[in-house]
Amino acid sequence: MLEAIDIHADALKRAALTAGPAARVPNCPKWTVHDLVAHIAFVHGFAVGLAVNRPVKPEPPADWDDVLGWWDGQRLALREALAKDPEAPAFSPYPGFEVTVGDWTRRMAHETAIHRLDAESALDDVPPTRFEPGFANDGIDEFLTYLTPRFGRKADIRVTTPERTWTLGAPNAEVEGAADDVYRALWGRPHQASVTGDLAPLAAP
């Protein structure tokens, strides 16, 4: 998962530099690319503190060039903070739930991957990025079994990919398709999965 953070952060940065800071982000209509980069820079910086049990809320610089450089520094700090025993306890912002360093590594891999798609959506020529089934299925599992309860969401859903099936609660919604498409559907990104019912109750804040 550490390698996945690097891969998706590098791709996100390449897309952001190509699109430019003022470009709109179709996947996140309220954001420019500058907003997106500032967000992921904040998230990576925030995760550094959580991984070492010293939570802080970092403030990325406002200038485009400065925030890019600041983010590079936070990425290096994040890799160092996460290169510990994955079972080591870390700070949990979720009342009643314990969190490990490994949990934050997984969380940052999927956070970065989803925002990679957002950065690429701002390009004139959107690349045909597809996540391999192992990674996408892990992202689905993280969304349903890790994030959903920690966000206080009630999951009544059946989710099916060619490799796995999840049934939570008494399903009143179903999502089925290739793992890549189901992963995107759960995160509210463009997809080609089959969706029955309303996914809005599961939406991450």
Image: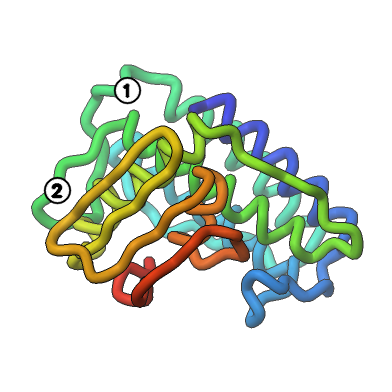
Residue that appears at 60% across and 60% down: 192
Residue 150 position by quadrant: bottom left
What's the coloring here? rainbow
Q: Mark 1 points at which residue?
A: 86
Q: Nearer the viewer, residue 53 or 139?
A: 139
Residue 101 position by quadrant: top left
Residue that appears at 44% across and 66% down: 195
Question: In the rendered image of this protein, does residue 112 appear above or below residue 63?
Answer: above
Q: Is mark 1 on a helix, strand or loop?
A: loop
Residue that appears at 30% across and 75% down: 201
Q: Which of 66 and 107 is in front in this view?
A: 107
Question: In the rendered image of this protein, does residue 81 appear above or below residue 58?
Answer: above
Horizontal and vertical percent for residue 76? 60, 32
Residue that appears at 25% across and 43% down: 91
Horizontal and vertical percent for residue 100? 26, 33
User: Identity of the amino acid at label 2?
Assistant: Phe
- Disc 1: CA contacts within 10 A as few (<14), some (14-19) or many (>=20): some
Horizontal and vertical percent for residue 43? 50, 54
Instruction: Give the quadrant of the C terminus.
Output: bottom left
Q: Mark 2 points at which residue?
A: 97
The residue furthest bottom is 30
Can residue 143 be seen in the rendering of this structure? yes
Horizontal and vertical percent for residue 174? 34, 62
Q: Is mark 2 on a helix, strand or loop?
A: loop
Q: Which is nearer the N-term, disc 2 or disc 1?
A: 1
User: Identity of the amino acid at label 1?
Assistant: Pro
Cα–Cα gap, marks 2 and 1? 16 Å
Total marks placed: 2
Residue 200 position by quadrant: bottom left
- Disc 2: CA contacts within 10 A as few (<14), some (14-19) or many (>=20): few
Q: Which of 144 and 71 is in front in this view?
A: 144
